[in-house]
Image (cartoon, coloured by chain):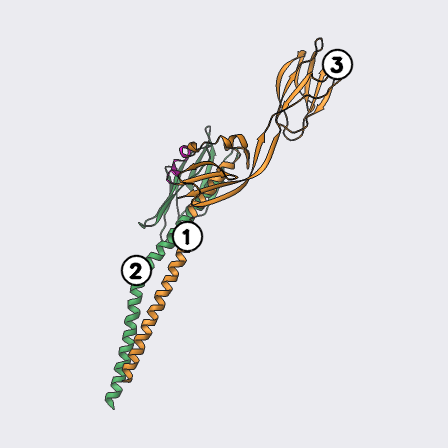
Chain colours: A green, B orange
Amino acid sequence: MADRAVSAVIGKALEASIVVLYIGLLTTTLYAGVLPEYRTAAATEVTDRTLADASGEIGTAIPQSGGETTARVDVPTTIRGETYRLHVREGSLVLDHPHPTVGDRTPLVLPESVVSIEGEWHSADPAVVRVEATDDGYAITLETGDP
Amino acid sequence: MRGQANLIALATAIVVLSGALVAGLAIVDGAFGDADRDATERGTAVELAETLVRSDSSLATRRNVLDATRTQRFDGERLADRYPSLSKHDVEIALDGDVLARTGEGRTGTTVRRIVLVEERQSAAWTPSIEGTEPAVTLPRRTDRAILKLSPPAGTSMTTVRVDGRVELRNESGLAGEYEVPVSRLTTATLSFEADGELTEGDVTVEYFPTRTRSAILEVSVDA
């Protein structure tokens, strides 16, 4: 009689520990293997979107005829939980991210009237694009601050 | 015996749960794959189209209006030189199906379409029927400039030519020869002449440049 009761308890304890073990195994597998990949995939899409939006806003800020314009550009503060930088290199807008697999560049298509583009943005600071008319054409500067 | 039956039930439940998890992950993978929108390709194509139709673009006469002659002379090689950052991309620009420029294989990747106007300037010659010493005629079509050939008869000298009431040419000793005058593009211009003798048809011929405008679809394709 007592044996039967004990075996029931042992049986239930065994089941409980199996379930707990299973949950622990599952959680470890998911967090170590699958989740980082999904976060990186999502971060890649957000990076592409951010680059397209930022380069589009730079192009829109260039006036059709003369003058100086300043426009604010909205970029997400963090991608994949970390802040990043945007700068221009060789005619492309480059997104520099601390994570090795996140980061991309997009070519900047600007009209011939633009002679120079320089500066950089940090995602944590408010981003502003300033277009000035010089003797040879437009000079674009990426700066932080208020427009 | 009952305890072991429970264990078997537990094992089955765990197997079923794992199967459900795997199925769920497969669905998530599929969803991520479908969410690929190539935002940078589309952004580049939109920017390229926008650059081509700006009022200060080499192809355009006004914003969203392209000049037909300049589009026919558009050079594909210039595209690669102008935008070296696009050298690794396949870009194609087409107007109403005719390819204007292409690098690499065209028509792959993301395509962006815009409606634009294509303007063609023609040249028309017109000999207005004029009579009297101060005739005035109105051009049949709008144009941005006119080339006047003045040949008044011997003994008569034309002193003034007015465009829309504004004095454009004046010479007290007589105007003769070929003159180009700017004309307002917004209304059909009125030319009035002043001479000290009778003018007849043939003394003045006008060459003007009316435009014909049609709408077209500009397609820009970019493949990263």
Foreground label between 3 and 2: 3
Give the secondary structure at mark 2: helix
Is A62 situated left or right of B210 in this image? left
- Label 3 and label 2: CA atoms lie apart by 98 Å
Q: Nearer the viewer, residue B160 or A83?
A: B160
Find disc 2 in the rendering and name its residue: A33
Subunit of label 2: A
**What is the x, y in percent for residue B181?**
62, 21
Whether residues under marks 1 and 2 lie with C-beta atoms below 8 angstroms apart, the answer is no
Q: Is residue B190 above or below residue A47?
A: above
The kind of secondary structure the magenta stretch mainly shows is helix
Find disc 1 in the rendering and name its residue: B36
Q: Amino acid at mark 1?
A: Asp
Give the residue at the far front of this rendering: B98
Give the residue at the far left of this rendering: A3
Find disc 3 in the rendering and name its residue: B198
Give the residue at the far bottom of this rendering: A1
Is A48 situated left or right of A28 in this image? right
Q: Which mark is residue A93?
A: none
Q: Is residue B211 above or below residue B178?
A: below
Q: Nearer the viewer, residue B178 or A120?
A: B178
Q: Quadrant of the N terminus of chain A?
A: bottom left
Q: Amino acid at mark 2?
A: Gly
Give the secondary structure at mark 1: loop
Magenta region: which residues? B80-88
**What is the x, y in percent for residue B98?**
50, 37
Is B140 situated left or right of A3 in this image? right
